[in-house]
Amino acid sequence: MKLNKTIIALAISALVLSACSDTDEKDTSLLDGNLNANSGINDASTSGLNKGYGMNGSAMSGNGDYASTLGPEFNDPNNPLSKRTIYFMLDSSEVMPDFINVISAHSQYLIANPAQHITLEGNGDERGSREYNIALGEQRAKSVASLMKARGVSESQLNIVSYGEEKPAVLGNNEAAWEKNRRVEVAYQPR
Amino acid sequence: MSFFNKVLFLIAFSLFVQNSHAALTIEISEGVSSALPVAIVPFSSTGAPVNISAVVNADLERSGYFKMMAEQAMPSKPNTASAVNFNEWQAASQNYLVIGQLADAGGGQYNIQFQLFDVYKSGQLLGYRMTSTAADLRKTAHHISDLIFEKLTGKKGVFSGRIAYITTTNPASKQQSHQLQVADADGFNPQTIATSVEPLMSPSWSPDGKKIAYVSFERKTAAIYVQTLASGERARVAEFPGINGAPAWSPDGTRLALTLSKDGSPDIFILNLSTHALTKLTRSFSIDTEPSWSPDGNSIVFTSDRGGKPQIYIVSSQGGEEKRLTFSGSYNARASFSPDGRNLVMVHGNGNDYRIAVMDMSNKSINVLTSGRSDESPSFAPNGSMILYASKKGGTAFLSAVSIDGKIQQRLLFNSGEVREPSWGP
């Protein structure tokens, strides 16, 4: 993008105004202040901001999960492959027993389909600091990954990314929302 | 006796500036009881696009240091020194008086002059005449605020400064979009400097205010970018496997401290921005993140859960022994130093609420300054007087500021979606 550079002359002048002519202090402060005034107002980087910059992030929004295109078993509510979200307790990255069968089902599918790659997307609730929640989300994703590897899934099939609290599944400032946001999403990649 | 100072400078300027006016509301929930009474008489003006005296009035009021006189209560509205009757301002219990004029000088230029008087001494404290383009009138007003603030408090004003923050539009939909924005310290003149459908995080100003480092997930993986504000150019400086997060500039501007998990658990690294050399600073098997430099560059504080819960630790920026700093509260995170290095501001949690607290480095005592349930991302203003942070109430996210003693609280409400991770620029 082309920049238009504009030269702007900015003039500042100090002026001794007539209201009070009885202090020497006044003259000093005017002179000193005037120098400061120049550097303060002529802050080139402040003005230089007048340029939009878009980075054209991927147009494919959403979680990028292609599982529903892979087969009917991924859409069958009675099949554990249809469950692709694993939830966690507060401040914990330990997988709860309820989700072991889900992780086992995806592991078996990945072992049977070695060309298939998935991304484990770690997430957290909104409480606490954001970068710490990124770390917590990664721990959750790594917990799921290590269970899958223990079941025989090749490490090369597994990608991990943590979004921390940046991609909440549910908006809200209460426990009902928070428990839905402390999660790992199993996102199938296009083959 | 007047002298004329002419300065040339370059403005990178786009024809397509999206200069939306922020619908910003500032609420001062609490101010200091010793606030100084100041009267700013509306400047005489000839149809200028910006009401300069109103901007100055709002700046000074927002600082919490001053009690601004309402226009209706003013005994008179002088615009020249000869018209000032100090007796009537003394009778109105005003300590200080500001008068001024704004005149169209033609060619898009305006002449502004103002004077600050000590009412009880019946004397002038400041007097300036300035020239400004129409586009720079708000900036000129903030500069006047800085001059008055410094004269009356002895502290540098921060009204001319800028803040960076992240906003999300359509947060509830899959079409959400994240923006990194930079605005004036009063929230006006917001400009988007980066946009992504994937999250943007952790903006960090370079010490010279010319660049911002931030985290972007635009490639569906975390990466750290350094963007030059004037040109919009940027460089991807870290995209290792795993976490690339929490960039923090060294005070000399040559290095970034950051968090990488490429070796397993998240650790603090230092990236030399000219040589691209990467040095590993911490080596724990737990989470180490959120580094921040001491003002002298000798130390780095960071968050670690090596003791079971997140707490603040400190290490020499050369590496070495890592010492725990916080022992009060079950959750302490995202610490950063005050500009004088004497205090540390952090997120302080007790299990339910996450609030902003300041730790005195000399005795390690912690003072909780805020009362929200989910306050986060604190950073000091460059003059150390205020702390900017993000908070939520009733599903609305907004920016807040609190004085270091907790006595002055204010909220900056934006009307556009979610706003978070404020950072006060130098």
Image: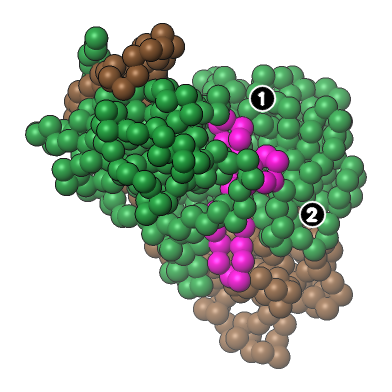
Chain colours: A brown, B green
User: In what quadrant of the picture does the N terminus of chain A appear?
Assistant: top left
Q: Estimate the x, y position of residue B327 in percent, counting from the top left.
A: 89, 42
Say which of B239 and B281 sits in front: B281
Q: Amino acid at mark 1?
A: Asp
Q: Quadrant location of residue B246?
A: top right
The residue that disc 1 covers is B340
**In the image, residue A179 above or below residue B382:** below
**Residue at point 39%, 18% (across, down):** A33
Q: The disc numbered 2 marks a residue on which chain?
A: B
Give the numbered dot on residue B349.
2
How would you rate the neighbour count of disc 2 (Cα within 10 Å): few for under 14, some for 14-19, many for 20 or more? Answer: many
Q: Quadrant location of residue A3?
A: top left
**Does the rendering let one see residue B183?**
no
**In the image, residue B371 above or below residue B56:** below
Q: Which secondary structure lies at badge 2?
A: strand
Say which of B344 and A135 sits in front: B344
Q: Amino acid at mark 2?
A: Gly
Q: Magenta includes B383?
A: yes
**Does the rendering let one see residue B366?**
yes
Q: Nearer the viewer, mark 1 or mark 2?
A: 1
Q: Estimate the x, y position of residue A173 in percent, counting from the top left.
A: 66, 70
**Residue at point 85%, 38% (across, down):** B365
* Residue stretch in magenta: B381-408
Whole-Å distance between the Cαs marked 1 and 2?
25 Å
**Residue at point 83%, 27% (across, down):** B362
